[in-house]
């Protein structure tokens, strides 16, 4: 596959409306690694949240955004697992539903947006691992993250469905681990590594979602990890932002730093915590810097 | 086959749920099964038995987190998560029970094109630590954090009209 270096940045609703640290850190680190990010006018919701009530509405919104990128001749780089999965799946879904495909195409054409389905969506880990490459990442590390023991949390939709071939092995992914290793931190597997964060249940039953997140965080904390590394804004909303709610509602006693991979990478590149949006994280991320300063 | 069976099949676009041989791998990995009387295996069995009406009127179909583990591990490629999602779609089409979060979500997208417009967030003056998890903070927006203003759909009414039309497609 042709390796692109220029992408349409698609932050997605959650990142562009509140999970700013992901966008700040991505905009800081990616251009320094040779990835050009283009802001495309007119992007809307990717449609993913509507999948449960209307697959046609999801497919229309998803295809509409891809058509906007196509008009600019760009592949898409979403900053959200859910948005990326939407864009990967919609072409297949419309292929399997030709009647719907014709209707969606017709509707988009009337908006001046021809849709061919030729635009590809790239997961941020795929861009970092396969386009930028581990060697390049190793070469930009100026402040190795020595002494940190990190747990990875991919998020369900970076892995599944496996038939979408989002990253590597959906039952034993290695991309995030391979991207952390050159930063100088230690990364270890743990039994709950691929467990869901529970966010998908937040819309119907908040307490259950908090219990699922709390259970995973507690397992990580009990195994002596210094921090959790993720790439998904929805998982981040649960694992980082909801620690207080978890403590109060479920009585699960947790306090653990959670960061985006791009924040971690930025720290290793010597970029300031402020530029990486670390002071937007709600978990005790100061612990990470305290540990690094002790080096 | 009843009318509901046909409609459900039309949404999933396949007959794969008929391949299920009730091995239970889906229920054993399901994160929601630990908390609710929610078993993907049972839901697929009920669909096979034509008990769709019972499923639509119960809240159980909304307890799926769509983590897709069942879909990944199903040895028969029956896609329990897809079957559940199709049931949810059907519940919406037939105006049965839909959690209240969804109409609000749809309204927001119809009005603004997005789930949520940018809000001000808490920015710590010093990074929080385990001893001091709540420090002094101020509220800041995208602009003051150095992020560009993103240009949203120019003619939001056009998008809303299109979306409203699409939302009705399966209702006809």
Image (cartoon, helix red, strand yellow):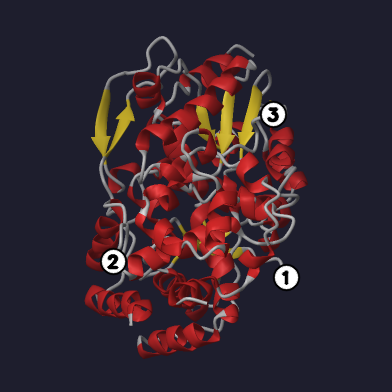
The residue lying toward the viewer, choosing from A265 and A66, is A66
Residue A247 position within the rendered picture, expressed as x and y whole percent measured from the top left: 39, 19
- Residue matched to label 1: A2
Judging from the image, mark 2 belongs to the subunit labelled B
Residue sitting at x 40%, y 25%: A246
Q: Residue A274 in the image: x percent, y percent?
A: 42, 32
One can see residue A85 in this view = no
Asked whether A159 or B95 is in front, the reply is B95
Q: Are marks 2 and 1 on the same chain?
A: no
Nearest the eye: A216 or B32: B32
**Mark 3, secondary structure of its residue:** loop
**Is B158 left or right of A4, judged from the image as shown?**
left
Q: CA distance from mark 2 to mark 1?
A: 46 Å
Q: Residues within 10 Å of mark 1 (few under 14, many from 20)?
A: few
**Measuring 37% from the left and 49% from the top, which residue is drawn there?**
B59
Q: Secondary structure at mark 2?
A: loop
Instruction: Give the quarter of the image for residue B104.
Output: bottom left
Asked whether A217 or A225 is in front, the reply is A217
Q: Residue A191 shows which numbered tag?
A: 3
Residue A104 against residue A138 in the figure, above or below: below
Report how far apart the C-alphas of labels 2 and 3 lie in the structure.
42 Å
Q: Is residue B117 above or below residue B48?
A: above
- Would you name the residue on which mark 2 appears? B95
In this picture, is B127 found above or below A142? above
């Amino acid at each position: 596959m042709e390796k692109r270096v220029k992408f349409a940045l698609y932050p997605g609703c959650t990142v562009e409306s509140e999970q700013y640290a992901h966008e700040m850190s991505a905009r800081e680190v990616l251009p320094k690694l040779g990835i050009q990010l283009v802001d495309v006018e007119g992007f809307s919701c990717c449609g993913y949240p509507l999948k449960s009530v209307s697959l046609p509405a999801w497919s229309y919104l998803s295809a509409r955004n891809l058509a906007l990128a196509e008009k600019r001749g760009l592949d898409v780089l979403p900053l959200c697992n859910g948005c990326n999965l939407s864009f990967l799946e919609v072409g297949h879904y419309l292929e399997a539903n030709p009647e719907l495909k014709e209707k969606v195409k017709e509707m988009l054409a009337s908006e001046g947006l021809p849709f061919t389905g030729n635009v590809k969506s790239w997961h941020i880990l795929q861009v970092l691992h396969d386009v930028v490459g581990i060697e390049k990442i190793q070469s930009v590390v100026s402040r190795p993250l020595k002494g940190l023991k990190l747990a990875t949390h991919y998020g369900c939709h970076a892995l599944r469905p496996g038939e979408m071939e989002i990253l590597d092995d959906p039952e034993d992914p290695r991309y995030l681990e391979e991207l952390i290793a050159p930063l100088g931190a230690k990364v270890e597997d743990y039994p709950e590594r691929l467990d869901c964060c529970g966010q998908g249940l937040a819309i119907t039953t908040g307490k259950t979602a908090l219990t699922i997140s709390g259970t995973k965080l507690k397992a990580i904390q009990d195994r002596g990890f210094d921090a959790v590394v993720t790439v998904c804004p929805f998982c981040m909303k649960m694992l980082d932002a909801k620690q207080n709610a978890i403590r109060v509602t479920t009585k699960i006693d947790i306090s653990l730093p959670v960061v985006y991979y791009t924040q971690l990478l930025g720290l290793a590149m010597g970029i300031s915590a402020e530029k990486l949006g670390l002071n937007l994280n709600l978990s005790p991320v100061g612990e990470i810097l305290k540990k690094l300063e002790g080096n | 086959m009843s009318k509901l069976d046909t409609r459900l099949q039309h949404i999933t676009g396949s007959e794969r749920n008929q391949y299920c041989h009730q091995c239970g791998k889906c229920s054993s990995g399901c994160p929601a099964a630990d908390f609710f009387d929610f078993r993907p295996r049972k839901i697929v069995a009920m669909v096979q038995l034509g008990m769709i009406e019972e499923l639509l009127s119960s809240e159980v179909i909304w307890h799926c987190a769509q983590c897709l583990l069942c879909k990944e591990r199903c040895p028969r490629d029956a896609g329990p998560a897809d079957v559940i999602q199709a049931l949810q779609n059907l519940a919406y089409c037939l105006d049965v029970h839909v959690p209240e979060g969804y109409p609000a979500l749809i309204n927001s997208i119809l009005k603004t094109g997005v789930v949520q417009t940018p809000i001000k967030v808490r920015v710590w003056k010093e990074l929080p630590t385990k001893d001091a998890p709540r420090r002094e903070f101020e509220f800041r927006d995208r602009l003051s954090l150095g992020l560009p203003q993103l240009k949203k759909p120019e003619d939001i009414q056009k998008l809303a009209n299109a979306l409203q039309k699409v939302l009705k497609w399966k209702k006809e």
